[in-house]
Image (cartoon, rainbow, N blue to C red):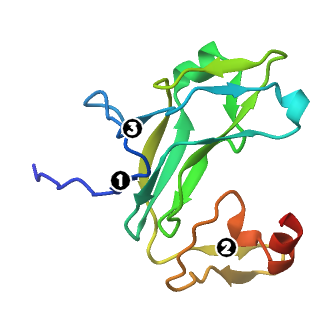
Amino acid sequence: MRTRKPLSIGFNPLRDDIEVPQIKTQGSAGADIVIPDDVTIEPFSLLGKGTLVPLGFSLDIPEGMQVHIMLRSSVGLKTPIRLSNGVGLIDSDYKGELCLLLDNLSKNSIHIKSGTRIAQLVPFSTLKWGFELIVPQSRGRKYFNPIQNNKRSGGFGSTTETKETKANEN
């Protein structure tokens, strides 16, 4: 049997007290992420949007890879906390701080203590050759063409922001 070298993802703490995500067992697909600060997640009905929870680190994901952030199954079983976007997809060109966008589906505020293992990072390979979408109605083909060497630091919809959108936010 051939032994493979593990893929390397750079971990960049943005503060001194940040824990490196840990792979807890031999069979684990992901590395557990802990919440670095106490946080209160208000009921979704009060906010109408998710609560942004900064994780205090960024990643250097090699080209050809992506990282997904998923809640740990115990969080889904034991709490009304959910990721607003279901699964966080971190592209290799994203260089900003990782955050969770959490919803509280209960009617009560939920307090999460710092150090709580809440989510996990799971790496995936990205197809380097892109992909094609076949549109049966037109019998034609649409091709995905990756954009060359764009580094971005925005997240949560940053690829759809326009100059006008950013001006309206300021």
Question: Which of disc 1 and disc 3 is earlier in sequence?
Answer: 1
Q: Which mark is residue 133?
A: 2
Question: Which of disc 2 and disc 3 is earlier in sequence?
Answer: 3
Where disc 3 sits, the SS reads: loop
Pointer 2: residues within 10 angstroms few (<14), some, or many (20+)?
A: few
Side (left or right) of 35 relative to 81: left
Instruction: Give above or below for 4 relative to 46.
Output: below
Pointer 1: residues within 10 angstroms few (<14), some, or many (20+)?
A: few
Instruction: Give above or below for 43 relative to 144.
Output: above
Q: Say if mark 3 contacts mark 2, CB within 8 Å.
A: no
Identify which amino acid the numbered label 3 is placed on: Asp
Where disc 1 sits, the SS reads: strand
Residue holding disc 3: 17
Q: Say if mark 2 contacts mark 1, CB within 8 Å.
A: no
Q: Which mark is residue 11?
A: 1
- The label nearer to you, 3 versus 1, is 3
Residue 74 x, y percent position in the rendering: 53, 19
Identify which amino acid the numbered label 2 is placed on: Leu
Q: Residue at the location (40% across, 62% down)?
A: 61
Residue 161 x, y percent position in the rendering: 77, 71
- The label nearer to you, 2 versus 1, is 1
Instruction: Estimate the spatial distance between the alpha carbons at disc 3 and disc 1, rounded to whole Å.
Output: 14 Å
Question: Which of disc 1 and disc 2 is earlier in sequence?
Answer: 1
